[in-house]
Image (cartoon, rainbow, N blue to C red):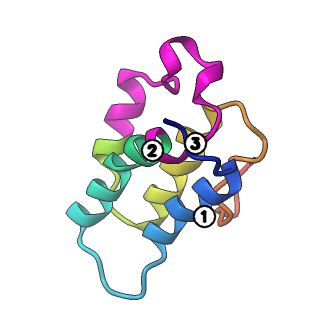
Amino acid sequence: MHHPFSGLVLATTIVSIATQAFAQTAEDYRNDALSVDRLIEENYAYLDRFPLGAAPSSDQLRSEAEAVHDARSLVRYAERRLSTLGDPHAITGRSLGDSWA
């Protein structure tokens, strides 16, 4: 069952992981990156427009999630992961200086 959340709500949820007030370890950031797929699956309202109702993914994206180690790399990964949705409303809300999104 899909929840009626917009891409913006999903993005806000993902970015809130990266901006928590407490210190995180590299493993915490990696685990946060690895949780993005689950957050998309549980909250993105338009999965039905993809084959088999699943957001596009790849081995390359999974490798990038595994390599996340700090807030900057988490935001970078989240931007790339959300871009696979092809939804201009699914954004991180926080971006890096060289972000194109």
At 37% from the left and 51% from the top, the residue drawn is: 33
**What is the C-alpha distance between the residues marked 2 and 3?**
6 Å
Left or right of residue 64, residue 11 in this image: right
Tag of residue 44: 3
Q: Disc 3 marks which amino acid?
A: Tyr
Magenta span: 41-64
At 67% from the left and 48% from the top, the residue drawn is: 7
Tell me the mark number nearer the camera, choosing from 1 and 2: 2
- Which residue is most to the front? 1
- Residue 71, percent across and down? 44, 67
SS under mark 1 = helix
SS assignment for the magenta stretch, majority: helix
Q: Is residue 17 magenta?
A: no
Q: Where is mark 1, residue-wise?
A: 12
- Residue 76, percent across and down? 53, 52
Q: Nearer the viewer, residue 39 or 93?
A: 39
Q: Disc 1 marks which amino acid?
A: Thr
At 64% from the left and 47% from the top, the residue drawn is: 4
Q: Residues within 10 Å of mark 2 (few under 14, many from 20)?
A: some
- Residue 12, percent across and down? 60, 64
SS under mark 2 = helix
Q: Residues within 10 Å of mark 3 (few under 14, many from 20)?
A: many
Q: Where is mark 2, residue-wise?
A: 42
**What is the C-alpha distance between the residues marked 1 and 2?**
14 Å
Tag of residue 75: none
Q: Hey, which quadrant is residue 84 in on the image? A: top right
Q: Disc 2 marks which amino acid?
A: Glu
